[in-house]
Amino acid sequence: MQERHRHRYEFNNEFQQEFEKNGMMCVGRNPESDLVEIVEIPGLKWYVGTQYHPEYQSTVLKPHPLFMDFVKTAIENKK
């Protein structure tokens, strides 16, 4: 998976256990640096945080899969 970044922020891996103990799971890592790239909170209907910018790989005709999943989940959970 290739994603685009536009910053120099990094997740401090020293805090990973604390985050996971409180429900935020680190589910995606950069294989070269071992830095966390994607987090989720499994108990919620949809919560994803990324270090990259999915909007840079999105177009009107071909949205990034994260946006598609967010919209799909919103429609499924519409009251």
Image: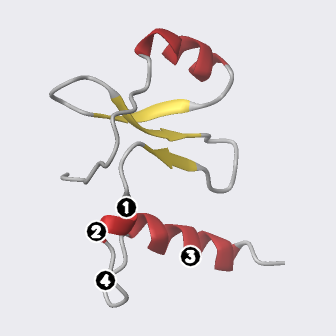
Can you tell which of label 3 and label 1 is closer to the viewer?
1
Q: Earlier in the sequence, mark 1 or mark 4?
A: 1
Give residue 75's position: percent from left, percent from top.
66, 80
From the viewer's side, name the closer residue of 45 and 53.
Answer: 53
Q: Which mark is residue 57?
A: 2
- The amino acid type of the residue labelled 3 equals Lys
Q: Name the residue at 42% across, 15% down.
A: 13
The residue tagged with tag 3: helix, strand or loop?
A: helix
How far apart are the two marked residues, 3 and 1, measured between alpha carbons? 16 Å
Mark 1 = which residue? Answer: 54
- Neighbour class for label 1 at 10 Å: few (<14), some, many (≥20)? some
Task: Return the residue at label 3.
Answer: 72
Crowding near the residue tagged with mark 2, few <14, some 14–19, many ≥20 C-alpha atoms within 10 Å: few
Label for residue 9? none
SS class of the residue under badge 4?
loop
Tell me the quadrant of the picture where the C terminus can be found: bottom right
